[in-house]
Amino acid sequence: MALIGAPNVGKSTLINALVGAKISIVTPKVQTTRTLIRGIACAGSAQLILVDTPGIFPPQRRLDRAMVGTAWGSAQDADIVALLVDARKGLKDDDAAIVRGLADVRGRAKVLALNKIDVVAKPDLLKLARTLNARVAFAATFMVSALSGDGVDDLKKWLAAHVPPGPWLYPEDQISDAPLRRLAAEITREKLYLRLHQELPYQSTVETELWKDLPDGAVRIEQTIYVERDSQRKIVLGKGGRSIKAIGAAARAEIAAAIEQPVHLFLLVKVRQGWGDDPERYRQIGLEFPRE
């Protein structure tokens, strides 16, 4: 199931709720999700592969085009496509454009999920649902609050009943297909944005350079935070190194909880000008490099 929608409608929060564990980072910053994050959930005899996609919006830069292309590509490859709409905001221009784009996604079951229903009056929810269903032949419509979990089980049960038959693709206890190195980098990137989202452009990135298991059972992880200008490097470091220390402490605690091992995390901040036009960087974060 590919979950698509405009930026910041709650896709990553919903994927985490469906999986029952945090596998996708969540921040207030738009376009936080850059590549496909696959969560794995079991419901009865069904195994669900839940694809969190980058937000779809009018792309302006090469990185934007790569993210939007990845989102639409996931919709074309999925068995089921779910459109998530922020019910609090209603039908905005980005949502309307996505609805029009869904017409080109053929041969796939399409599901509508209205999010943040706990802050919207019921008549407004029903009106929004009718408007969207008049534009797309959705197989089902769900009212959910990804944050509180309301309605999430109903969506999960419907998905389990409608996935095609076939063997399970992953072990029962696996919750994501993301390599641990990438998961650790994503956690650090989340902490970076949560602390500095008003000050730091989203073109910054984090790469795990070293992952070494130590004799005492701990893990040594070395990561590099790449920014595009020296002024951004100074922001990440903070006065007296306070910002980078806080980011590192928060990331270390969450990585250790995720892998259930003690973690020694070392962060470097480097300037890499023009990384948004470097094909190798796109490969590192799992995106296809747009040639135009």
Image: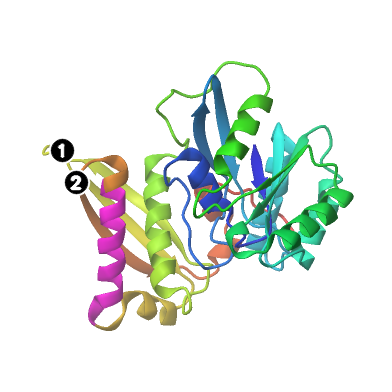
Are the residues tagged 2 and 1 within 8 Å (C-beta)?
yes
Q: Quadrant of the N terminus?
A: top right
- Choose between 180 and 75: the one closer to the eye: 75
Question: At 60% from the left edge and 64% from the top edge, which residue is drawn?
Answer: 119
Q: Is residue 138 above or below residue 90?
A: above
Name the residue type under label 1: Gly
Q: Is residue 125 left or right of residue 226?
A: right
Name the residue type under label 2: Pro
What x and y, as percent, mark residue 26? 48, 58
Q: Secondary structure at mark 1?
A: loop
Spatial separation of the CA atoms under disc 2 and disc 1: 7 Å
What x and y, as percent, mark residue 64? 66, 62
Q: Quadrant of the C terminus?
A: bottom right
Q: Is residue 116 visible?
A: no
* Residue bounds of the magenta highlight: 240-256
- Does the segment drawn in magenta span residue 10? no
What residue is pinned by disc 2?
A: 262
What x and y, as percent, mark residue 158? 65, 32
Main SS category, magenta section: helix
- Choose between 102 and 286: the one closer to the eye: 102
Q: Is residue 267 above or below residue 241?
A: above
Q: Is residue 63 left or right of residue 212?
A: right
Q: Secondary structure at mark 2?
A: loop
What residue is pinned by disc 1?
A: 217
Q: Residue furthest left?
A: 216
Q: Is residue 136 left or right of residue 77?
A: right
Question: At 25% from the left edge and 77% from the top edge, which residue is drawn?
Answer: 241
Q: Is residue 230 left or right of residue 140?
A: left
- Choose between 43 and 247: the one closer to the eye: 43
